[in-house]
Amino acid sequence: MSDNQNEAWRGKIGRLSEEEKKAFLEEGQLGRLAVLDDDGWPYVVPVWYEYSDGGYYIIPRARSRWAQYMKRDNRVSLCIDDPAMRKVMVKGEIEIVEKPNVGGRWVEIGKRMSIRYLGERGPDYLEPTINEPRWLVFLRPIETTTWQGVDWATKYKHSNW
């Protein structure tokens, strides 16, 4: 067996192409959003997201502590990954698209998210709380890093330590 066949378990190694990134982000992995709390400490919360318009829509509940943190300091990071060692890591800034409201643009985005994360019955999860106010925020990426496969990037392998 050739070395390449022995290494097939590692998968494709390297950065995700734009097409691979888009396909991965449409699969429905949870994101982990890091915001800064009132004392400047990282506060990480799992989130649903919708990747479109060159960034990430996120819909916090009106009383979410982390929504208040984002309102105060819009610097955030988002990590989306899976057990197959694919990952997208984003550093960016939050823009408030809608302050907490009932019936805003967030509803349609939320319905799409619920289907993506929960399947065709997803809106059944959303419907009982549709009258609870929510924010609509947009994470505009400043820097995005991607990776796939079970291996280290070359820059980590051959250092002159």
Image: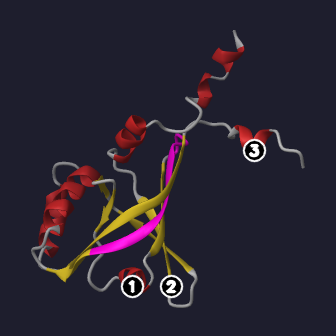
| Kind of residue at disc 1 | Arg
Give the CA distance from mark 2 to mark 1: 9 Å
Q: Residue at x 42, y 84 (%)?
A: 69
Which residue of the protein is positioned furthest toward the top in this rendering? Answer: 1
Most prominent secondary structure in the magenta stretch? Answer: strand
Ranked by sequence position, the earlier of labels 2 and 1 is 2
Check the image and report above or below for 91 versus 116: below
Helix, strand or loop at label 3? It is: helix
Element on which disc 1 rests: helix
Residue annotated with mark 3: 156
| Residue 9: assigned label | none
How far across and down, in percent of the image, does residue 112 sit? Answer: 19, 55
In front: label 1 or label 3: 3
**In the image, 72: left or right of 54?**
right
**Residue type indicated by callout 3:** Tyr
Relative side of 12 to 113, left or right: right
Mark 2 is on which residue type? Asp
Residues marked 2 and 1 touching at CB (< 8 Å): yes
Between the residue at mark 1 and the residue at mark 3, the CA separation in whole angstroms equals 37 Å
Any mark on residue 65, and which? 1
| Crowd band around label 3 with a 10 angstrom C-alpha radius: few (<14), some (14–19), many (20+) | few
Which residues fall within the magenta stretch? Answer: 83-96
Q: Nearer the viewer, mark 2 or mark 1?
A: 2
Q: Specify whether residue 95 is painted magenta.
A: yes
- Magenta stretch: residue 74 in it? no
Residue positioned most to the right = 161
Q: Which residue is mark 2?
A: 37
Q: Is residue 125 left or right of residue 15?
A: left
Judged by depth in the image, the label closer to the viewer, 3 or 2, is: 3
